[in-house]
Amino acid sequence: MSAVSLSGCASYEINTQRGNIPGLYIRQELQQADRAVEAARQAGKNQTCPAEFKAAEAARDKAYDVYRACHTEEGVALANEATAKAQALCPPQAPKVVPPPVEPPAPKPAPVAPAPVAPPPAPAPTDTLSVAPASIVKGESATLTWNSQNATRCQIAPGIGAVETSGSLKITPAEATRYELSCSGAGGSAVSTTEIAVTQPAPVVVPAPKLCSPTVVDVQFDTNKFDIKAKYHAELKKLADFLAEFPKAHGVIEGHTDSVGDQASNMKLSQRRADSVRNYLIKNFGVAPERLQAKGYGPTRPRATNKTAEGKAQNRRIEANFICD
């Protein structure tokens, strides 16, 4: 079977048993390595370059060990390396070449003075401009702040003119304005801009004729609640005292909510709040029921923004509008 399986495999040859490898056939690369090492020994290279010879011999032995462990291709690769090392041992030395006589160097030319170096260009200016706050109500003030580097002159438009290269300034624009900072220096110029928004103040509401105070009662509620907290009892007593002072006064207790929840639920909740205050005044201070009406407006009449917790708390409130005959 060995003869049949190896027919036509030129990479195998009869095993000489030099590497203690069992079997009739062995890869020819291992015995080539063995022959190359022995040929180097016969040529005396083990004496001429003993360290390199030992390295080639060790490479051959390692190839046999690896091959014996059934790592055939790895053993073959190591055998090829051993063969190359053995064949490269003690290469012949090239004949020593005597260099021709060196002529004395020619005298060095006189040094040439370097060309003058131009000074580096001046750095380009930079600047920044900001305003705080970025939005005001007409009549309020804001602060412009600016800073620049590598600049000698600065100005701000519109309406401000020349300024120091850094600083701050109070401004009270009457309308939305875009400010521009321009700074210049030896290296050029720079421009920065900022904008401020100006909103109109809320219109002043003139009370309707014949209405008398109080128009706002400081009673607020927790979210989705309509029960009156104890801390507001004193405020409701002031309202009762007012009604006692003006016995003909009559009006509407208005309930309001913030925008949390849906509209229908908030309308019901605001009505419950108005009813709670009306019932409290009737029960605790003997106010005649016919003098008080209760009306819920839900979130339709906010007193403050619903975008903040503080604004929402202000919107969960009671207002009372009375007519004094």
Image (cartoon, rainbow, N blue to C red):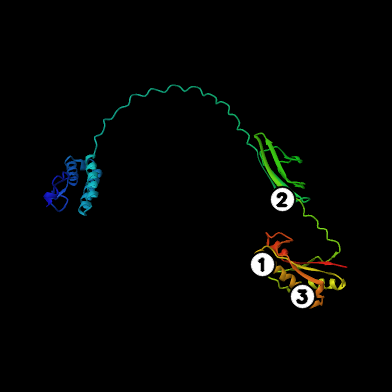
Residue at screen point 32% across, 26% down: 99
Provide the secondary structure element on which disc 2 rests. strand
Q: Where is residue 126 in the image (x, y as percent from the top left)?
A: 65, 40
- Closest to the camera, between mark 3 and mark 2, is 3
Residue 280 bears which disc, if any?
3
Return the residue found at the far front. Answer: 290
Decide which of tag 3 and tag 1 comes sooner along the chain: 1
Q: Mark 2 points at which residue?
A: 135
Decide which of tag 3 and tag 2 comes sooner along the chain: 2
Is the C-beta separation of discs 3 and 1 under 8 Å? no
- Closest to the camera, between mark 3 and mark 1, is 1
Q: Where is residue 304 in the image (x, y as percent from the top left)?
A: 73, 60
Provide the secondary structure element on which disc 1 rests. helix
Task: Name the residue type under label 2.
Answer: Ser
Provide the secondary structure element on which disc 3 rests. helix
User: Which quadrant holds the C terminus?
Assistant: bottom right
Is the C-beta separation of discs 2 and 1 under 8 Å? no
Which quadrant holds residue 280?
Answer: bottom right
Task: Name the residue type under label 3.
Answer: Tyr
Q: Nearer the viewer, residue 266 or 232?
A: 266
Above or below: residue 41 compared with residue 94? below
Q: Name the residue under label 1.
A: 265
Inter-mark Cα distance, 3 to 2: 43 Å
Task: Name the residue type under label 1.
Answer: Ser
Residue at screen point 37% across, 24% down: 102
Q: Nearer the viewer, residue 227 or 325?
A: 325
